[in-house]
Image: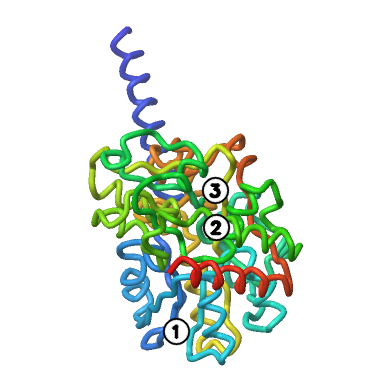
Amino acid sequence: MRKTILFVLVSLLVLTISGAIVAQETELEPWVCPEGFEGQSLSVYNWSTYIGETTISDFEALCGVTVTYDIYDSNESMVARLRQGNPGFDIAIPNDYIIALMLREEIIQPIDITKIPNLANIAPEFVGLDFDPGNEYTVPYLWGTTGVAYNIDYVGEEITSWEQVFAYDGPVAWLDDSRTMIGIALLMLGYDMNSIEANEITEARDFLIENGDNVFAFAQDDGEVLLQTGEVDIAIEYGGDVFQVISACECETYVYILPEEGSIGDIANLVLLTGAPNPELAQVFMDYILDAQVGADITNFTQYASPNGRAIELGLIDEELLSNPAITPSEESRANLTFFEDIGDSEELYLNAWEEVKLALR
């Protein structure tokens, strides 16, 4: 009798486990490309270090297409190029604050969300954001932070604040980005990082000039490389870029922190560019990117946080990335982050102030 009961229990356990495995496999069915795109081409304009190792090649194989992949180093340089007319890009991946400007200047066009069913995978908190309440123009891609990366062997002490960065007696790289650096200076002066007050932006400019004696380089989205080669001891950089270096190093040499005074958060989005040569394939690519496994693979490789709630729910993203507050900030940590907003014509004030900072410190 006991053997019979044991056999039944084991059988039920096996069936339960098998059912769970089958269910999981059903949930994880690989993304399938719609028919009819074989032989076509797509052009993607993106940041460097901001895509999975095989994301592009897998898409090419799945759809039988060719993807041209080009990179930019800032939202402003991307927009400046597109203002001259779209040279043939289908998709770009700008950050939140620049999207309103791209809309005003008609650099992007609406998407058809009925052709992007995997938009349902995005966590609710990343849908319908202020810059695009109806998700008419944007598809969430990755999100992350800007903070301080440093070589602990060279610096010799724990860094916790922006004040330490500005006071450091050694080579430092600043990110060559007007909103980031003027924003940090505004924060240090007690102002809103999205200020549109000309006098406050001028004060921020002067603060950076007065506190820029240790600047070795204005990094073009490559501060992590300068840190890795030993050219600088500290770099103001995007978190994911730094964690890619930390992961490859498998060492305790490099540290990334969000300063106690506060820091910057950002959300990058896929957009369909005006004049895109292949908008239909572009929307297929967007759906592919939002697949749970594809999205998880991008995050696991780039070390940037994912807005893909489905990928998180299914446990596809490395737990160490989800539990690291510098990569995936907790709700408490997010309260200390500022997300840049559209500042309209005041954008020019930031650009001019930043150019004056660089001229003064060169």
Please name which of the two marks, 1 or 2, marks the residue nearer to the observer: 2
Q: Is residue 273 left or right of residue 297?
A: right
Instruction: Decide if residue 225 is in sight here.
Output: yes
Identify the residue at horizontal 56%, vertical 68% (top origin): 354
Q: Quadrant of the N terminus?
A: top left
The image quarter containing residue 157 is: top left
Which residue is at 34% across, 80% downward?
A: 64
Q: Nearer the viewer, residue 252 or 52?
A: 252
Answer few, some or many: residues within 10 Å of disc 3's Cα (few below 14, many 20 plus, some between 14 and 19).
some
Q: Nearer the viewer, residue 220 or 281?
A: 220
- Identify the amino acid type marked 2: Leu
Q: How is the image coloured?
A: rainbow
Q: What amino acid is found at the position of numbered circle 1 in the picture?
A: Gly
Q: CA distance from mark 1 to mark 3?
A: 30 Å
Label disc, if present, on residue 309 of the rendered structure: 3
Disc 2: which residue:
208
Residue at image location 56% in from the left, 79% down from the top: 79
Asked whether the viewer can see residue 51, the reply is no
**Label 1 SS:** loop
Could you classify mark 2 by the number of other residues whose Cα lies within 10 Å: few (under 14), some (14-19), or many (20 or more)? many
Crowding near pointer 1: few (<14 within 10 Å), some, many (20+)? few
Residue 36 image label: 1
**Image disc number at residue 80:** none
- Comparing labels 1 and 3, the label whose residue is closer to the camera: 3
